[in-house]
Amino acid sequence: MDRLQSRPVALRTKCAGRWTDLGYRDMAERVQDLSIGLSELGVRPGDRVAILSENRPEWAIADYACLAARCTDVPIYPTLPARQAEYILRDSGAVAVLVSGAAQLAKVTAVRERLPGLTHIITFDQSAAGPGVLGLEQVLRQGRSARPRHPGWRASALEAVEDDLATLIYTSGTTGDPKGVILSHGNIASNVTTCVGLFRFTSEDECLSFLPLSHIFERMFGHYCMFHAGVVINYAESVDTVPADMQEIRPHLMASVPRLYEKIYARVLDNVRTASPLRKRIFAWSREVGERWAEATIAGRRVPAALRLQRALADRLVFAKLRARTGGRIRFFISGGAPLSADIARFFYAAGLPILEGYGLTETSPVMAVNTFAHHRLGSVGKAIPDVEIRIAADGEILTRGPNVMCGYFNKPQATAEAIDEEGWFHTGDIGLLDPDGYLSITDRKKDLIVTAGGKNIAPQPIENLAKMSKFVASAVMIGDRRPFPIMLVVPNPVQLKGWVQHKGLPDGELDQLLDHPEVRQKIEREVRQTLRDLAQFEMPKKLLILAKDFTVEAGELTPTLKVRRRIVEEHNRPAIEALYVEK
């Protein structure tokens, strides 16, 4: 951070409708004061300190302060309920927790009596401080006044070595209790330096950060990489404000899970559906031209002059307008966390908004493979990054080995031994393919594979993603393991469905009321069947269970990173599922 302290802006966040800047020098001083303040409270190197907060500058300051104090920070998703936060605080042995404000503080105070090892609670919101709860400013002042007693603070911070534990991140997991992933300074540093070199971030760039910093993907990409390269980090107000924030900030870089790109794509197609016949023809032509140009460009082939001219016209007619909605300065997006549709990636590339898809897990810090401008193949997650090995096991599971692989699971030696074999290969639990050129494709989760009673193997995720290509489908989950045939649970998009109902002159109402109409249910079924029309017969869900209530983190049906807990979803809907299998 020293080399960047002369730069004016490190972070930018929106408060009361105005964007507020935080410079590197001010940030460095707060990191030092909080680090010393934690030491004054009795926090020692190796102790665990939890962070339970939404994205905000204080999150970043707390993270760097913990690393400088050589204690281990334990990020907790702010969406987790109190009982799950309690489990992480207890299992990690956290001696202190930093919370954002009253809502997160309430979770901790509700379980504090059952956490005798939790000595300190610090809130970023001074108004939430009180008996037994310190305000962040109070700890910062304490650290500032104690600076003379810590003349060797910087030297002490630099004593951290590669094998020292940096963070303990609890995987959300699709089954069972979360496991604490032990990541060292060396694990994370290897990923950061490699990715900065691959993507050539510059100090002239700005990024928009909206994925939770509790997740290693955003933390590594939108936090450590950006600081390392001097990129200005802008924190979105919320997921819902991302479109507006993009217009205001006009970022050059963004990282997201595929859902953001799916929503943008669905909105574009929705606008086309309601356009005039002429506009539809213009869009169809522009898309076809743009995708031919994209395929040639990505493959490194010479683009014919006629195609270059056509693409320039298509850009003027269609694609430039889409780029303007993203702020007009995007150099590229990064996608991770779930498979991205090749059709969506191709369309975005054609529009001059390249999405570089990658792959990794919390246990791999996280990046294992990624597409770059030098090596890019649509439909894949790219090649293994430098110094990382990837191979496919006999059963199709993806294995990896390298400096980014975790040290193990906290207090779980058996789970660690099951995940990392004697040769150092980490077993990802994902199924994939490596093509002859070294590009990796993910087909499904090993544990999610559905094996029907007839012995057919079905990978549910690609089928679910196809169903969600319809603007009328918000969520889709395949069920059918050890069953005679697969079925699909579908949650309609209420906004789109209401618009269709009003257009048809049907009685309006809440989603559960709309689903009482046979015409509405038939519409949803037609939409799903249309998106799945190219599936093999054994892959096609034979029946649909249309639900009025979407899956949620609070109900345990989704992980904090919005992955489906298939077993929980099935359990919550068991009576209706059993009824479908009984029906002729």
Image (tube, rainbow, N blue to C red):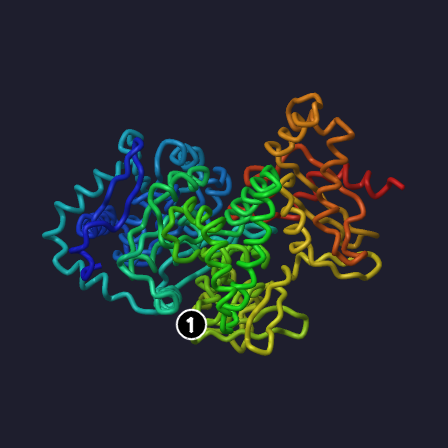
Q: Is residue 234 left or right of residue 30?
A: right
Look at 27% across and 37% down and name the residue there: 134
Look at 69% across and 35% down and name the residue there: 547
Look at 74% across and 26% down and name the residue there: 516
Residue 413 visible at all: no
Where's residue 98, x and y in %? 33, 43
Where's residue 96, x and y in %? 34, 45
Where's residue 216, x and y in %? 43, 56
Q: Up-down: is 458 above or below 103?
A: below
Query: For the N terminus, which image quadrant?
Result: bottom left
Residue that protrudes farthest toward the left in the picture: 148
Q: Give the image quarter of residue 222.
A: bottom left
Q: Up-down: is 531 above or below 378?
A: above
Q: Give the image quarter of residue 161.
A: bottom left
Q: Residues within 10 Å of mark 1 (few under 14, many from 20)?
A: some
Q: Is residue 421 left or right of residue 530?
A: left
User: In the image shown, does 345 or 175 lie closer to the viewer?
Assistant: 345
> What SS does tag 1 mark?
loop
Q: Is residue 81 left or right of residue 513?
A: left
Where's residue 10, x and y in %? 25, 51
Give, as a three-letter code, the residue at label 1. Answer: Pro
Q: Which residue is mark 1?
A: 403
Q: Is residue 117 left or right of residue 416?
A: left
Residue 246 visible at all: yes
Q: Up-down: is 67 above or below 301?
A: above
User: In the image shown, does 10 or 83 lie closer to the viewer?
Assistant: 10
Query: For the C terminus, which image quadrant?
Result: top right
User: In the image shown, does 156 or 209 lie closer to the viewer?
Assistant: 209
How many circles with numbers are drawn on the protein? 1
Q: Give the image quarter of residue 443.
A: bottom right
